[in-house]
Image: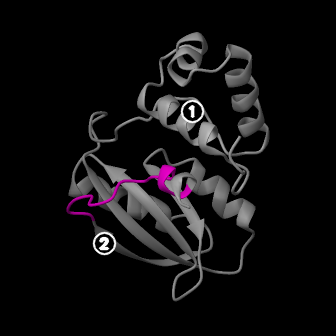
Amino acid sequence: MAARRNGLDDLDRRLLHLVRERPRTGLLEISRLLGVARGTVQARIDRMVADGVITDFGPNLSPRALGYPVQAFTTLEVEQVSRAEISAALTAIPEVLEAHIVTGPGDVWCRIAGRDHEHIQEVIDETLAIPGVRRSSTVITLSTVVPHRVQPLADRD
């Protein structure tokens, strides 16, 4: 067996590729494709789930296909209020796809989706109505050149 790097070996990486490329493939078929026992595949998946390498098994959804083709990045400047309050308020806005507390000129970075530019403005207005949010700065995305990905980190030597 190859040495583990960051907790992953070659079999783990091949397994991760298969699960991402063919998410509906059963364990028996994955074990056949990898040339290992079904129990080995199950044990590897269970370990990677327990270690936090695999974080979910849900389908990835497309905002565009759901009717939200416009995306934007918004930086919020906030007063010193509790993170839990800001987090709860942002979580309650379905168009907020993700939010991060950041360093730099802003305090919270959000990726938002909207039906059109006017809808993006409504979402921004909704974030500005959150108690403690002072102002925002927003840029609209034109295209995605590198989509969200993590697999290259697992593959890196």
| Residue at the front extreme of this rendering | 1
The question of residue 117 being in magenta is answered with no
Three-letter code, disc 1: Leu
Residue 48's spot in the image, x, y percent? 72, 39
Instruction: Using the image as rendered, state which of residue 138 and residue 18 is in the foreground.
Output: 18
The residue shown at (74%, 60%) is: 84
Q: Secondary structure at mark 2?
A: strand
Q: Is residue 151 inside the magenta stretch?
A: yes
Prevailing secondary structure class for the magenta stretch in the rendered image? loop
Identify the mark nearer the N-term, 1 or 2.
1
Q: Position of residue 85 (x, y in %)?
A: 70, 61
Which numbered marker is on residue 15?
A: 1
Which residue is drawn at the image coordinates 43% and 60% (left, top)? Answer: 111
Q: Amino acid at mark 2?
A: Val
Which quarter of the rendered picture does the C terminus lie within?
bottom right
Residue 126: x and y in percent read 45, 59
Label 1: state its secondary structure: helix
Residue in view at x 48 percent, y 30 percent: 18
Residue in the foreground of this view, choosing between 98 and 153: 153
Could you tell me if the residues under marks 1 and 2 are in contact, i.e. CB atoms within 8 Å?
no
| Disc 1 to disc 2, C-alpha distance | 38 Å
139 displayed left or right of 30:
left
Region in magenta: 141-153
**Disc 2 designates what residue?**
139
Decide: is 114 above or below 42.
Answer: below
Residue 130 drawn above or below residue 31: below
Residue 103 lies in what quarter of the image?
bottom right
Q: Residue at x 46, y 74 (%)?
A: 75
Is the residue marked by circle 1 packed among few (<14), some (14-19), or many (20+) residues within 10 Å? some
